[in-house]
Image (cartoon, rainbow, N blue to C red):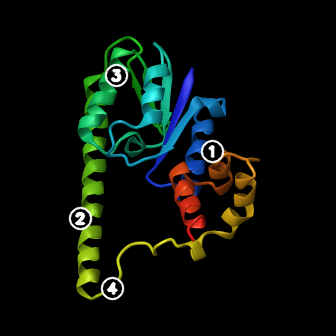
Amino acid sequence: MIYGYARCSTSEDRQDIDRQKRELYSLGVKKDKQIFWEYESGTKDDRAELQKLLDVVQCGDTIVTTEVSRLTGSTRHLCEILQTVRDKKLILDIGGSFRVDCSKGDMDPMTEGMVKMWGVFAEMERNIISQRVKSGMKNAAAKGKNIGRPETTKDSLPDRFWKYYSLYKDNQINISELARIMDCSRTSIYKYIKLAEMD
């Protein structure tokens, strides 16, 4: 069985995660239910969908992802994932161009070294970007500029939310359905509802 894994850091990257899904289909994934995807930081080790994927795969299965950085942004965590691939005798396919075949229980040292090196560079790139962002924010703050996203208020709630909020109030749709319609997380919906119900 071929399973896919896609990840973006935020739910605002909808287009990017859809692109990943299309690529996973081109790399051999047959059904949508065989793609595990989530909006989580790559530095987070305990991602729910990734863990579900690692739990469901069996000996001889293939995990496909578009890039090493989609699996994880941590070299340490990448080493743990590679160990799972080895222990479960899996195949890890990265973008269709690099294949880690542990179906016989071992891993080629050169292949292992290459993947870990990719992981090191991905983590370094993430740290450099993070450092630049922090420096930019510090510089902007020093100039008196407002940092971050504008605060969400009752008046700034999306029109689409108000359109379907009445259906939620009438118990015609639930939180999960409203989140799916809005294409955002349940956490955001709870926040919107709280604002909508403020006097």
Residue tagged 4: 145
Report the amino acid beneath label 4: Lys
Inter-mark Cα distance, 3 to 1: 32 Å
Q: Earlier in the sequence, mark 4 or mark 2?
A: 2
Seen from the viewer's position, the closer of residues 180 and 128 is: 180
Which one is in front in this view, the residue at disc 4 or the one at disc 1?
1
Please name the residue shown 75% across and 54% down the image. Answer: 167
Please name the residue shown 55% across and 66% down the image. Answer: 195
Inter-mark Cα distance, 3 to 2: 31 Å
* Residue 80: image location, x then y, percent: 28, 29
| Secondary structure at numbered mark 2 | helix
Q: Residues within 10 Å of mark 4 (few under 14, many from 20)?
A: few
Q: Earlier in the sequence, mark 3 or mark 4?
A: 3
| Quadrant containing the C terminus in the rendered view | bottom right
The label number, if any, that marks residue 176 in the structure image:
1
Q: Earlier in the sequence, mark 3 or mark 2?
A: 3
Residue tagged 2: 131
Q: From the viewer's perspective, is residue 114 above or below residue 173?
A: above
Report the amino acid beneath label 1: Ser
